[in-house]
Image (cartoon, rainbow, N blue to C red):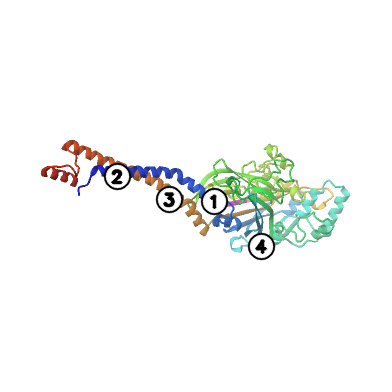
């Protein structure tokens, strides 16, 4: 039977229009479908296998790398000379986090305790826990500053107590002892006669209170009522605000618990989070876009104002009494000990801090902190949180252990907590959040392109039919009666 070109043209045109319409509809509906799936999968819900598992038990390797500032000239330092330090490390520990006592509440919140453990990784470390380092003795130099305003006779008694327990201004111990604790007669004495003055009741160590411990009782929003609230902190240890600082703004508990954030982030979004270890809320800001193994990301970093003092940045007035910019005074939540947090090597701090210590070399790549976030889901892909622990020290009359030490904020250690998504989790993440949306995007443009191509073909066929009409003067229809010669010509045209 001869082909009816007019009907073919109409068929192509209809199919093309339908394909274009479907493609256009898909451009609007597709993102809505993807966003709906993201919302369903980022709500804290045990039914969400991927994100709930990532939230409950961090399934990717997470490490803490610790660097000590070994004092090279302790005797000269005690005589008033500038301290010289040498960075030792990293000493790397695998960190295991696990949430327990998970309880969902009717107001779309969930509470939990997160426990953490650290395991030494010799193969990743430069050195061993048996390495010997010399750092300031916090029990002596920290206590001296805390007691400088006591009567002179009392300070003499304190100095005599230090001598009784053979505690000097510096301490030389193994890395393992300094990290997780060592026996001290002075610590036992203080815990017996002055209970509550020290952070631990057993061995004294820089991280003794962190290992096999929890970060407190967090209650956060699940995002069930509003996805914009997902992971945001409702309360910590039953508190909706802190009492460490001087202003209501400084005492606010803002943002999330620092592990995930609400989805659909933009370049104008920030990363607020509450850190129990820093005793305050902090906020990171957008720096640049990037890609990690095919997954798009936004990098967020600490602004220069994060640890600025109240003079340079007035909103930080509540965290004072302050010293130079770049230092956070955490004495109010560290048993009044003169401790300060900063970026490693005083990165982004007042340059004058570098003049007081030899051996520091700040560098953004090595010492700046960052979090790489997948903006659509709020899930961190790569994390590196770097902080330094410093002790404020100076000569205190009556306490001879302080010698002629110059007033200085002395770096003791810095540490980096880092981790990134890899392995099966990364593949699943890549498939669900990169490949499938890309396939849907290609489909919508594919349908539009196919539809337009089909419409063009229909137009060409229609144009040819009209041309044949003009040239032949008859309609090439199968029902039209034609002579044999005309039929042959029409058949020939159709074959052509």
Task: Residue 129: give its label.
Answer: 4
Report which quarter residue 63 is drawn in: bottom right
Q: Quadrant of the C terminus?
A: top left
Q: Could you tell me how far apart the alpha carbons at marks 4 and 3 are, in whole angstroms?
A: 51 Å
Residue bounds of the magenta highlight: 380-385
Does label 1 or label 4 sit earlier along the sequence?
1
Asked whether the viewer can see residue 189, the reply is yes
Taking depth in this image into account, of 306 and 162 the one nearest to the observer is 306
Q: CA distance from mark 4 to mark 2?
A: 78 Å
Q: Dots 2 and 1: beta carbons under 8 Å?
A: no
Left or right: 294 in relation to 89: left
- Residue identifier under label 1: 40
The local secondary structure at tag 3 comes to helix
Q: Residues within 10 Å of mark 2 (few under 14, many from 20)?
A: some
1 and 3 marks in contact (CB < 8 Å): no
Per the model, the C-alpha gap separating discs 1 and 3 is: 20 Å
* Residue drawn at 22 percent across, 37 percent down: 466
- Report the front residue among 416 and 432: 432
Residue 439: give its label.
Answer: 3
Residue toward you, 214 or 88: 214
**Front label number (1 vs 4):** 1
Residue 71 visible in the shown view:
no
């Amino acid at each position: 039977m001869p082909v009816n070109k007019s009907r073919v043209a109409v068929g192509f045109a209809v199919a093309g229009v339908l394909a274009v319409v479907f493609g256009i509809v898909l451009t609007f509906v597709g993102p809505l479908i993807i966003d709906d799936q993201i919302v369903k999968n980022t709500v804290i819900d045990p039914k969400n296998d991927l994100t709930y598992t990532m939230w409950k038990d961090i399934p990717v390797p997470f490490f803490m790398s610790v660097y000590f500032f070994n004092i090279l000239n302790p005797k000269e330092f005690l005589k008033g000379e500038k301290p010289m330090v040498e960075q030792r490390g990293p000493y790397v520990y695998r960190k295991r986090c696990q949430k327990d006592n998970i309880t969902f509440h009717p107001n779309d919140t969930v509470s939990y305790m997160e426990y953490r453990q650290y395991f030494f990784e010799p193969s990743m470390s430069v050195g061993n826990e048996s390495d010997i380092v010399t750092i300031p003795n916090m029990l002596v130099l920290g206590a001296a500053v805390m007691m400088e305003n006591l009567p002179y006779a009392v300070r003499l008694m304190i100095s005599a107590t230090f001598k009784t327990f053979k505690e000097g201004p510096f301490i030389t111990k193994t890395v393992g002892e300094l990290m997780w604790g060592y026996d001290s007669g002075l610590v036992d004495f203080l815990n017996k006669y002055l209970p509550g003055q020290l952070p631990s009741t057993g061995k004294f160590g820089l991280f003794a209170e962190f290992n096999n411990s929890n970060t407190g009782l967090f209650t956060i929003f699940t995002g069930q009522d509003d996805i914009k609230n997902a992971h945001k902190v409702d309360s910590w240890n039953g508190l909706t605000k802190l009492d460490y600082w001087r202003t209501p703004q400084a005492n606010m508990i803002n943002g999330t618990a620092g592990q995930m954030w609400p989805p659909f982030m933009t370049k104008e979004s920030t990363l607020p989070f509450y850190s129990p270890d820093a005793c305050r809320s902090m906020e990171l800001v957008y720096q640049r876009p990037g890609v990690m193994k095919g997954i798009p990301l936004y990098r967020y970093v600490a602004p220069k104002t994060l640890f600025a003092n109240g003079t340079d940045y007035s909103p930080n007035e509540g965290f004072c009494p302050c010293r130079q910019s770049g230092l956070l005074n955490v004495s109010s939540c560290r048993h009044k000990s003169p401790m300060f947090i900063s970026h490693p090597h005083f990165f982004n701090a007042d340059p004058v801090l570098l003049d007081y210590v030899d051996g520091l070399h700040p560098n953004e790549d090595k010492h700046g902190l960052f979090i790489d976030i997948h903006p659509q889901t709020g899930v961190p892909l790569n994390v590196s949180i770097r902080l330094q622990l410093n002790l404020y020290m100076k000569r205190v009359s009556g306490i001879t252990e302080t010698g002629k030490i110059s007033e200085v904020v002395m770096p003791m250690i810095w540490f980096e907590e880092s981790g990134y998504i890899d392995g099966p989790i990364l593949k699943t993440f890549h498939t669900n959040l990169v490949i499938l949306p890309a396939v849907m995007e290609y489909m919508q443009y594919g349908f539009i392109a196919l539809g337009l191509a089909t419409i063009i073909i229909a137009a060409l066929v229609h144009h040819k039919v009209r041309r044949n009409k003009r040239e032949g003067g008859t309609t090439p229809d199968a029902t039209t009666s034609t002579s044999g010669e005309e039929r042959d010509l029409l058949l020939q045209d159709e074959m052509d």
